[in-house]
Amino acid sequence: MADKTITCKDCGADFIFNESEQAFYKEKGFENEPQRCPACRRERKQQRNRRPSGNRY
């Protein structure tokens, strides 16, 4: 496996999907490559954690 350059679908920046990350994805059974750079993934995760989790009653 060689490193891959991927363009982030949110900010348009190029980022490297390196061999160790690819091996991790394969080991976990993930079929799709990341579509967002690490910074955008972090931001998106924070946004999800800030939202109320719906009606609990």
Image: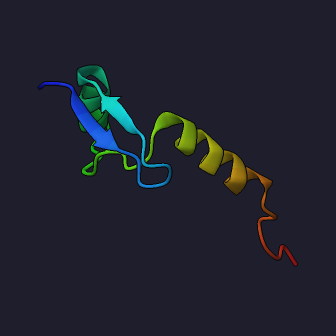
Which residue appears farthest toward the left when viewing the image? Answer: 1
Residue at 41%, 54% in the rendered image: 9
Quadrant showing the N terminus? top left
Query: In this image, 2 relative to 44: left or right?
Result: left
* Place of residue 12 in the rendered image (x, y in percent of width and height, measured from the top left): 42, 48
Please, is residue 27 above or below residue 36 in the view? above
* Place of residue 21 in the rendered image (x, y in percent of width and height, measured from the top left): 32, 27
Quadrant showing the C terminus? bottom right
Residue at 50%, 49% in the rendered image: 11
Which residue is at the front of the view, 32 or 26?
32
Please, is residue 50 above or below residue 54 in the view? above
Please, is residue 25 above or below residue 52 in the view? above
Please, is residue 11 above or below residue 42 in the view? below
Which residue appears farthest toward the front when viewing the image? Answer: 12
* Place of residue 53 in the rendered image (x, y in percent of width and height, measured from the top left): 77, 65
Residue at 53%, 43% in the rendered image: 41
